[in-house]
Image (cartoon, coloured by chain):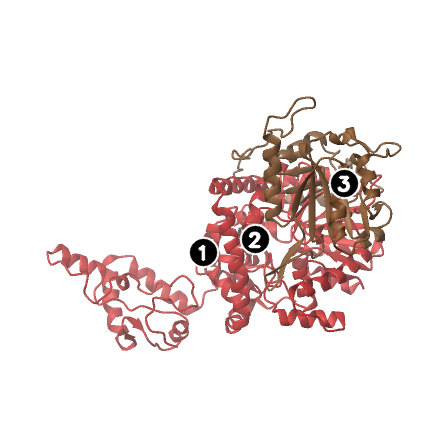
């Protein structure tokens, strides 16, 4: 299931060529981000709230050992079991052991990104255990033998036609393609699974240390089904998904749904604290909480620790110009978008995955919407730095940037470089833009606009002005281009709207 | 359930090693203080006056109004009722126009003790009250949800009490406990909830504060769910669809004024 890391550029290029995918991703992310904008517009104090949430997350992660111990104690007090899994293997073995002890045949799952990380379904299947995804989007993704493409709407890349085809295969008869009928089919089909399953597996939006509760939010209600009907509940939790108190949970809930979908609150906000109590007729008889590290602790104490503040709202994906063009799968692993570009290399290894840090225009839109104010674009720069430090940059890159560093370090050298560049660029430039170039620059140019160095730099213009011959700004050389000596536009990979006539 | 109620004193090995590792990673980190409660939030303002004291004039009405508006914004419906007769009429109207036969109800203590006190426990012998009588008389076949799971799954309507309402989001708060079925409000396609008006709080934070007060851990309920409107999804081409797994309809009957039921 794991795509190879080496081919991010190929995956991205394929995604860009797929116009239907681009359409689908844009439609959904547009709708989500419009929802968000509307939901936060009328909140006075929204910025203060984000800052408060950031501080809660910082405090919590700084004291993670303390709060996890408190949580574990509370869960056990309530009659639940807790297991701490350092590695993916530890977590998988534990879940398999519980499943086998209870002779589990069918598992119903509510959305859990961490189980995607662990590739748990495949391991369950190897033991003859059926795992059924019950979030409608995840169900579609599972039927398609696919991976989630978005944190909130995992099947955003699937067209109605594809969904109809998948559902008809399941149903064994034709279905009407309207949304209501498709939803009704999934409802009926999954209802059987809920009633039959021996075990429910869930993720965890937040654990609350104060009470030992697992907070699950879903709009569909599958989170409640999975934790009410099967005999055994297993909850997988990334170790950082914890808040100290109910008051802190309240703050996170205030932000999560608004940032994710623009709702004030998700339809079902479920707090589960231990197994069912004596006298109760439903709820799990046995509850296991599995707290998973799987590489997260590498981030603690590093410059990237704040990436663990993430509450997985997806807002950064919805606004990211790169994500909006290539979708989630091009990132190659479980998490797409800016947060994926940050944590995937950190969890799985910079040498292999570091190139994900290039999947950003550094426009900082992600940082601006992040409800817990993670400086995502700073982290991407930090990651790029790490990649370079580890000597991963192509030779040509390094040579060019050394030259560049040399030239800009001194104003005289810079002036000289500009004059030289003006002469060199002559054969390639028309109307202030580079029109063609020899390889390998041609490849770079194919997707970007490179403005020419202006005939006169700002500094030169300023000097003549100082000397008493003010130049008319209405000269036909736009001043703009004198600054833009090859700076990349936000939205790399797309033509700049200011780029004059297009060329291929 | 073997370990039920038996807190483990000994810290297991997996936990010890795991947390020690985190501690070692965190030693050099300058620890941020907790920011405290969010200043923009009402935490403690109790929405209902203590027993025997009249609530401030207009306060309950304001909360009812806000609750109803927020609920309808998310696709639910609020209706004011003042006695069991109203419940009967409501159910008759709800079922009159469609082919609906069966309903399940939870066995929330308030069916039997309509004072709607939080400390109400299931009475030894279930008293027959006006509310239960209304269910008998409404023309539906109503069974208790603790009967069997298949009965609940087959029912057309689930009828439950809600322990709290939250005005700012139009949410119901349903607690688990003896007689409080989790699935009665979940499996049937229509959910009808009775909510005492005096139990509508202004904010979620207030409800959390009161929960904490009433159920200090480990007395905390095994399940507390906030229900905000009908089940929904937008997973098929971003097209909104209602009622995917949970109910497609949520009707909240706000019982006001509180205590009227006792006279019935
Ligand atoms: S990084 Fe921020 S914006 Fe992105 S998913 Fe996480 S919390 Fe949301």
- In the image: residue A188, left or right of residue A333: right
A93 in relation to B87, above or below: below
Q: Quadrant of residue A170?
A: bottom right
User: Label 1 belongs to which residue?
Assistant: A381
Q: Which residue corresponds to the image point at 52% horizontal and 42% vertical from the top-left?
A: A54
B256 in relation to A463, above or below: above
Q: Mark 2: give few (<14), some (14-19) or many (20+) Cα within 10 Å.
A: many
A445 in relation to A95, above or below: below
User: Chain for mark 2?
Assistant: A
Nearest the viewer among A199 and A485 is A199
User: Chain for mark 3?
Assistant: B
Q: Is the C-beta of the residue carrying label 3 under 8 Å from the nearest atom of ligand 1?
A: no
Q: Colour of chain B?
A: brown
Is label 3 or label 1 in front? 3
Residue A261 circle label: 2
In three-dimensional space, the C-alpha distance between marks 1 and 2, rounded to whole angstroms, equals 28 Å
């Amino acid at each position: 299931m794991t795509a190879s890391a080496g081919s991010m550029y190929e995956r991205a290029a394929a995604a860009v060529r797929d116009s239907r995918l681009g359409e689908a991703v844009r439609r959904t992310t547009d709708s989500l981000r419009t929802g968000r904008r509307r939901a936060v517009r009328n909140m006075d104090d929204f910025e203060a709230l984000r800052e408060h949430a950031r501080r809660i997350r910082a405090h919590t992660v700084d004291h993670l050992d303390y709060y996890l111990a408190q949580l574990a104690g509370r869960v056990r007090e309530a009659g639940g079991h807790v297991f701490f899994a350092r590695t993916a293997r530890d977590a998988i073995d534990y879940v398999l052991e519980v499943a086998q002890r209870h002779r589990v045949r069918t598992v119903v799952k509510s959305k859990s990104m961490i189980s995607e990380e662990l590739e748990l379904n495949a391991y369950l299947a190897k033991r003859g255990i059926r795992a059924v995804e019950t979030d409608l989007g995840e169900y579609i993704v599972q039927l398609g033998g696919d991976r989630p493409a978005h944190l909130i709407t995992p099947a955003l890349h699937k067209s109605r036609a594809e969904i109809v085809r998948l559902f008809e295969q399941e149903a064994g008869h034709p279905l009407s393609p309207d949304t209501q009928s498709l939803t009704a089919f999934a409802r009926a089909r999954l209802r059987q699974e809920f009633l039959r399953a021996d075990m429910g597996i869930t993720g965890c939006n937040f654990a609350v240390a104060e009470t030992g509760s697992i907070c699950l939010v879903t709009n569909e209600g599958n989170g409640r089904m999975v934790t009410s009907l099967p005999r055994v509940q297993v909850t997988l939790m990334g170790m950082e998904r914890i808040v100290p108190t109910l008051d802190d949970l309240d703050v996170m809930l205030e932000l999560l749904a608004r940032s994710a979908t623009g709702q004030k609150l998700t339809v079902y906000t479920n707090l589960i604290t231990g197994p069912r109590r004596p006298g109760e007729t439903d709820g799990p008889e046995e509850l296991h909480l599995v707290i998973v590290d799987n590489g997260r602790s590498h981030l603690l104490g590093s410059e990237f620790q704040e990436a663990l503040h993430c509450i997985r709202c997806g807002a950064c994906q919805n606004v990211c110009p790169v994500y909006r063009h290539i979708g989630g799968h091009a990132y190659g692993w479980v998490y797409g978008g800016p947060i994926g570009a940050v944590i995937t290399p950190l969890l799985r290894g910079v040498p292999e995955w570091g190139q994900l840090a290039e999947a950003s225009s550094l426009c900082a839109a992600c940082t601006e919407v992040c409800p817990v104010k993670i400086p995502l674009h700073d982290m991407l720069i930090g990651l790029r730095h790490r990649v370079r430090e580890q000597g991963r940059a192509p030779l040509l890159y390094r040579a060019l940037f050394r030259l560049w560093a040399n030239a800009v370090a001194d104003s005289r050298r810079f002036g000289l470089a500009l004059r030289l560049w003006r002469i060199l660029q002559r054969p390639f430039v028309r109307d202030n833009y580079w029109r063609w170039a020899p390889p390998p620059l041609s490849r770079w140019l194919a997707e970007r606009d490179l403005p020419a160095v202006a005939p006169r730099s700002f500094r030169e213009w300023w000097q003549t002005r100082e000397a008493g011959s003010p130049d008319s700004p209405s000269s036909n050389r736009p001043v703009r281009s004198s600054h833009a000596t090859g700076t990349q536009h936000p939205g790399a990979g797309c033509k700049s709207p200011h780029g004059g006539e297009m060329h291929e | 359930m073997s370990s039920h109620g038996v807190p483990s004193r000994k810290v297991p090995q997996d936990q010890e090693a795991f947390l020690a590792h985190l501690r070692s990673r965190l030693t050099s980190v300058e620890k941020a203080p907790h920011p405290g409660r969010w200043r923009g939030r009402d935490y403690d303002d109790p929405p209902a006056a203590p027993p025997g004291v009249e609530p401030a004039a207009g306060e309950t009405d304001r909360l009812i109004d806000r609750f109803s508006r927020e609920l309808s914004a998310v696709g639910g419906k609020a209706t004011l009722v003042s006695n069991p007769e109203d419940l009967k009429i409501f159910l008759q109207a709800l079922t009159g126009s469609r082919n609906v036969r069966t309903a399940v109800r939870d066995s929330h203590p308030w069916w039997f003790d309509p004072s709607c006190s939080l400390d109400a426990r299931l009475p030894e012998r279930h008293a027959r009250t006006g509310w239960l009588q209304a269910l008998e008389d409404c023309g539906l076949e109503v069974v208790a949800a603790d009967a069997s799971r298949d009965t609940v799954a087959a029912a057309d309507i689930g009828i439950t009490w809600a322990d709290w309402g939250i005005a700012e989001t139009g949410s119901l708060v349903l607690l688990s406990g003896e007689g409080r079925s989790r699935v009665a409000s979940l499996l049937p396609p229509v959910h009808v909830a009775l909510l005492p008006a005096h139990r509508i709080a202004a904010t979620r934070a207030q409800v959390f504060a009161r929960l904490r007060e009433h159920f200090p851990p480990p007395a905390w309920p095994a399940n507390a769910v906030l229900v905000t409107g009908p089940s929904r999804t937008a997973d098929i081409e971003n097209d909104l669809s209602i009622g995917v797994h949970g109910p497609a309809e949520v009707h909240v009957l706000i019982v006001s004024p509180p205590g009227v039921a006792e006279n019935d």
